Image: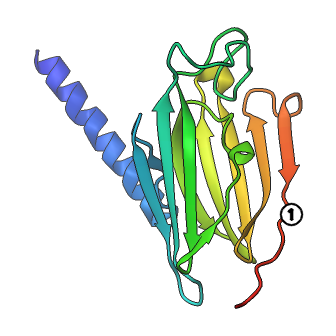
Amino acid sequence: MNTRRIFSMSLGAVLALVLMLEVQAGDLPLVALAPNRSTKLSLTGPGMEPIHVTLSLTALGSSYPYKSALLWGGDVDELPKQIVAAVQVSEGGQVVFVPLSAYGDLGDVKSADLKPSERGFTLELHGGNTASEYDAELKFAAGYLVSRKVILRAFPNQRTETATYMFPKRTEE
């Protein structure tokens, strides 16, 4: 019993040290997503408009119509347990349109992060389980979604999807 207590204290100390090192290195930890709920992320900084993202996950039920679909986070003949149901983005108070095609096939998302970029920001999503783990990047610039890239971690050269988005520019009223 004493051995277990010492081990758990040592493991706790190691985890605390690892977390301290991560924060000292300047990397903020990824936001863990709550299953079957919405999770909000925000990004603010000098000289940039505030960015707010809400990610909603939902469980796949028996009525899901695409049983044989290969969704990111799933496997052949095995669907992920949940999928991204909605991605809502605002930049400087303006709603940014995000089409279903940008997120509708992303399953079992575990964590997310917002990062500033030269012309906008990137929403990074990390999901899947073991062999089906993937990384997805949704890149935004000038108030629009401009691209999506999803890469299978285990075989990045064998399974990658990229998409480019072009939307009509808003006119000032």
Residue 14 % position (x, y): 34, 41
Q: How is the image coloured?
A: rainbow
Residue 121 % position (x, y): 66, 68
Amino acid marked by disc 1: Met
Identified at 54% across, 88% down, the residue is: 46
Residue 107 % position (x, y): 60, 31
Residue 138 % position (x, y): 71, 55
**Label 1: which secondary element:** loop
Rendered image quadrant of residue 5: top left
Could you tell whether 55 is left or right of 132 in the image?
Answer: left
Near-viewer residue (112 or 143): 143
Near-viewer residue (4 or 31): 31
In the image, residue 100 sits, relative to residue 47, either above or below, namely above
Which quarter of the rendering shows the N terminus? top left
Q: Label 1, on which residue?
A: 166
Identified at 56% across, 47% down, the residue is: 86
In the image, residue 161 sits, relative to residue 124, either above or below, namely above
- In the rendered image, the residue lying farthest to the front is 173
In the image, residue 172 sits, relative to residue 130, either above or below, namely below
Could you tell whether 19 is left or right of 160 in the image?
Answer: left
Could you tell whether 33 is left or right of 170 in the image?
Answer: left
Identified at 39% across, 41% down, the residue is: 37
Rendered image quadrant of residue 24: bottom left
